[in-house]
Amino acid sequence: MKVSHLSLALAGALMAVGGAVVAQPAKHHGAMKPNPMVGGAAMLPTKDIIDNAVNSKDHTTLVAAVKAAGLVDTLKGPGPFTVFAPTNQAFKKLPAGTVDKLLKPENKAQLTKVLTYHVVPGKLNAADLIAQAKANGGKATLTTVQGEPLTAWVQGPNVWLQDAKGGKAKVTIADVNQSNGVIHVIDTVLMP
């Protein structure tokens, strides 16, 4: 699928999930709970996913990958999106040379597949993920924009994700609200 068609497919997927659970921002004693800092930067709920992510020093690899895949305009769109955002350290866990290979123009389709596997249509905060897992015997299946499922579950105080290949990622910072969705920072790159 060409990237120009990806935006259309993504928009179609989002239209198709009009009934998706869209959580309200977390409240704390009657007031909006402030977003956590990410990568040393304030994450403003009035900015979109891209405008916030570019300020995080922990997400420079992810931002470079989103730019290389041509997904900036899509993730600046209205959404809403739930983005599981791997840190630079998460990308460093991949086999040597993987990131450089994915960033090459000839591998744009593969890079797009990996990145869209980290995006779920709708806005799901941590409470939504936990509730879905509890309602489904301890595990929730999330369908990504890429089309393949992710599994979410709770272990101790943490939300975890498992990808199609059996890899696991822990949500290290949850509920970073954006104007067009929510970001959950994760410690491992998920692979479709």
Image (cartoon, helix red, strand yellow):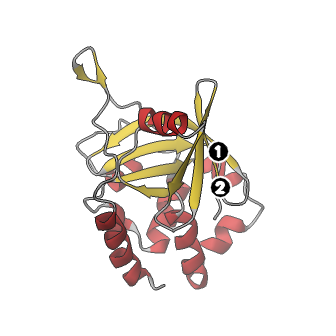
The residue positioned farthest toward the right in the image shown: 95
Q: Is residue 22 left or right of residue 160?
A: left
Question: Marks 2 and 1: CB-CB under 8 Å?
Answer: yes
Q: Helix, strand, or loop for circle 2?
A: loop
Q: Where does residue 152 sit, x and y in percent of width and height?
A: 58, 44
Residue 69 on image: x %, y %? 48, 73
**Cα distance between the residues tagged 2 and 1:** 8 Å
Q: Is residue 40 visible?
A: no
Residue found at x 22% / y 20%: 31
Task: Quadrant for residue 28, please give it.
Answer: top left
Q: Given the image, on which type of amino acid does mark 1 rest?
A: Ala
Reading the image, the residue beneath label 2 is: 163
Crowd class of label 1 (few under 14; some 14 to 19; many from 20; radius 10 Å): many
Left or right of 38 on screen, residue 96:
right
Identify which amino acid the numbered label 2 is placed on.
Asp
* Residue 174 falls left or right of residue 104: left
| Residue 22 in picture, x, y percent from top left | 31, 45
Reply above or below: 109 against 47: below
**79 above or below 179?**
below
Determine the residue positioned at 65% across, 55% down. Answer: 163
Nearest the camera: 94 or 33? 33
The circle on residue 112 is none
- 160 shown above or below 84: above
- Where residue 74 sits, quadrant-wise, is bottom left
Q: Position of residue 191 (x, y in %)?
A: 65, 61
User: Which of the two discs, 2 and 1, labels the residue nearer the N terminus?
Assistant: 2
Residue 140, relative to residue 66: is it above or below? Answer: above
Residue located beneath label 1 in the image = 169
